[in-house]
Structure formats: C-alpha cells, structure tokens
Image: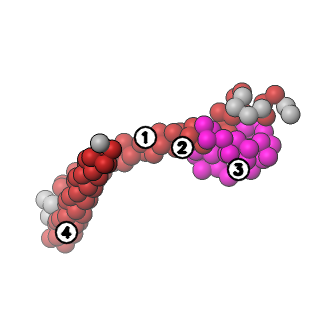
Amino acid sequence: MAENERIGRGQGSEVLAAELASGATVAQAASKAGVSEATAYRRLRDPEFVAQVRELRSLAVRSAAGRLAVAMSKAAGVLEALLTSETETTRLRAADRLLDHAVKTAEVLELEQRVEELERMAAIQRDEKRR
C-alpha cells in the first residue's frame, strides 16, 4: 500500500475528505486525493473519517448560510425600496412579495420555537426516567 493510501494518514486523506464534503463522487475525490477508489471506500467505513467529512460539509453549509443571510437582507432592502416605486404594479408586487415572505418567516420561526420546546420537554422526560 502506498504511503498516502494508509488509512488516516497524509494529505491524501485530508484532500479526500474535503472533496467528498464538497459533493464530489468517490471516484472524483479519490482521483484528486491521489488515492485509489478502494482506499476511498475503506476510509468511508471509518467513523472518524466520516465525522470529518460531515464536519467539513457542516462548515461549508454554515458559511453559505451566512452569505445567504447577508444577501437576504439586501434583497429585502430592494423590495422595500420598490414599495415607493412610481409604478403601481411594481409597488403592488413588492408589497405582495414582502408580505408573503414575512408570513413564511413567521411560520418558520414559530415552528422552530415549537420544536425547541418539544426537545426541551423530551429532555426533561428523559432525565426523569433516569432517576
């Protein structure tokens, strides 16, 4: 087995994890990492490696979510500015979109609060059963 194909060793493992986290196929990720597909599949049977891939993917998602939050704020500003358009149709569409998004946002926030409350209640019940 080549040095960079040893499980858990070398830069190949890091590249493999990064490529898999970014959505590459196993074959693509193995090629970029300079390891065989067999090694890539072997790594995917290692819980620590799978956790590393998940963490890298999670970091990418959080980064994208931050960028989307900034863009959403800018988009809301655009819609807000369109509320003062001289064209009645533009004002109406902007108002409709803003209201639609506001309702959806309120629904998501309410669901989030309800889920958090259910999780809190479930944790309390688990703790009581352990006693």
The C terminus is located in which quarter?
top left
Per the image, the residue denoted by label 4 is 96
Q: Quadrant of residue 67?
A: top left
Which of the two marks, 2 or 4, is nearer to us in this view? Answer: 2
Say left or right for 20 vs 125. right
Inter-mark Cα distance, 1 to 3: 24 Å
Inter-mark Cα distance, 1 to 2: 14 Å
Say left or right for 63 vs 39. left
Per the image, the residue denoted by label 3 is 26
Which of the two marks, 1 or 2, is nearer to us in this view? Answer: 2
Q: Main secondary structure of the magenta part?
A: helix
Say left or right for 127 vs 55. left
Tell me which numbered mark, 2 or 3, is placed earlier along the sequence. Answer: 3
Residue drawn where x is 79% and y is 46% of the image: 38
The N terminus is located in which quarter?
top right
Q: Quadrant of residue 90?
A: bottom left
Q: Position of residue 14 (x, y in %)?
A: 65, 33
Q: Amino acid at mark 2?
A: Arg
Tell me which numbered mark, 2 or 4, is placed earlier along the sequence. Answer: 2
40 in the magenta segment: yes
Inter-mark Cα distance, 2 to 3: 15 Å
Residue drawn where x is 18% and y is 54% of the image: 81
Inter-mark Cα distance, 2 to 4: 39 Å
Residue 116 seen: no
Q: Quadrant of residue 111?
A: bottom left
Per the image, the residue denoted by label 1 is 63
Helix, strand or loop at mark 3? helix
Please report the bounds of the magenta region as a residue range. Answer: 20-49
Residue drawn where x is 73% and y is 47% of the image: 41
